[in-house]
Image: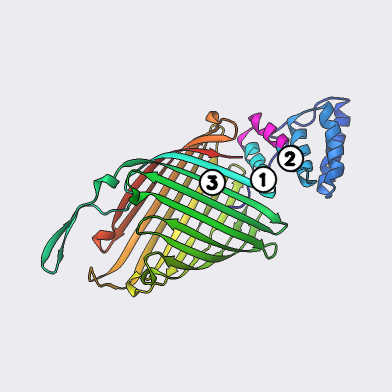
Amino acid sequence: MIDAPVDISPTHLEAPQPGHSETENQRQFLIGLQLIAEGRPEEAVDVLSDLYARSPTPRIRLELARALMLSGRLGEARQLFVEAYDDDPPAAVKSSILVFIDRIDRQRGRLKLQASIARFGNPLRQPDTYSFDFGGIELTFEPDDEYRDIWGITLGGQYDRQIADDTSVAVSASYRELRGDLADRFTGNVGVQHRLGPRVSATVGAARLDQKFQSFTLPFTRVAYTETLGPRAALQPALTVGYFFSDAGSSLSGVQVEASLPYLFTPTPTQRFAVGPIFQRREAGFAEQSFTSIGLRASAQWRFEEVSLELSLRGRLTRFDEIDPFWLERREEAGASVAAAISSERLRVGSFVPGLTISCDLVSSSIDYFEQRNCDYAVQINRIF
């Protein structure tokens, strides 16, 4: 998503209050703002520090923090931003403060942690009970109930850091532990992103999934372009090319290409929306495992005074290249993934906020065996800064 616009205007926080005199405080405050606008943050720090010492209002503190950040004094800036956040300002101001803290942490090195207790409805994506004819013999598939409606834990973390003006590195990992080892899962990602200009970035990285009978490694290169459509909207087309190395062997391995064209819209600091088409093509050693998928992906985020809400939706149509030699039918699928997450800062402890996430995956397939219905529920603890 694009960064939320920063809004710390006097409509949200009061301007300087009388110290020496209201007129003099206001004049010094405007001088500080002008110095920031002219790219002279070090001088702005001197002016605003003196002003804040005699008139410690929230608005002056935020502008002083911004000047400190722009002058490279990141630790001091972050401390002031956190203090401002802890004062429980309006939701729009909180969103802007988080943007600043995020920028600082990316320069210094940012670690985000997450832990959850979850109920997994169908972690192996098993089909329901059904019967089929195989060579004149009627067979019945029965799902393994041991892997239905089970509880487990997930631990995860992400670290990213800006290592040069135009280059950053990101590493993430997550581990899921459930009853029975078939559904235990590790996922990991590493990537190095380099900005090739004000609008273009390139990322080189790799993804890894470890789970019995599903493990793979995917090295990839991604190129993204941002076309600004105004102060609050943008198009961000992206193309990713990689090679899907399945642990099962070359029959499931091959080149993978993904493309997306999201429209990003941030009408206010507390609202973010994205919607756009997606495309995926994967080659495989066996033609019946090669497929093309097209779909639509959308997301929305709202931040209210009491709670934050996130919704995401992905719909897709998938067609495999050849008739499956076992099922004697070409596999065609329609799928939808829906997720909703809600959290409340009224329950925040330090930088950690609890939340609830509900996600569902539904797949309708021309081959009954590949049909899926799954819903998961997770209670999470997230580090927001």
Eyeballing the image, is 158 above or below 304? Answer: below
Residue 75: give its label. 2
* Residue at the spot of label 1: 105
Is there a contact, CB below 8 Å, between mark 2 and mark 1? no
Secondary structure of the residue carrying numbered label 2: helix
Eyeballing the image, is 186 above or below 117? Answer: below
Secondary structure of the residue carrying numbered label 1: helix
Q: Quadrant of the C terminus?
A: top right
Stretch in magenta? 79-91
Main SS class of the magenta portion in the image: helix
Q: What's the residue at 70%, 36% (across, down)?
A: 81
Looking at the image, tell me whether mark 1 or mark 3 is earlier in sequence order: 1
Q: CA distance from mark 1 to mark 3?
A: 15 Å
- Toward which corner of the image does residue 346 lie, by quadrant? top right
* Residue at the spot of label 3: 157
Amino acid type for the residue under numbered disc 1: Asp
Eyeballing the image, is 137 above or below 169? Answer: below
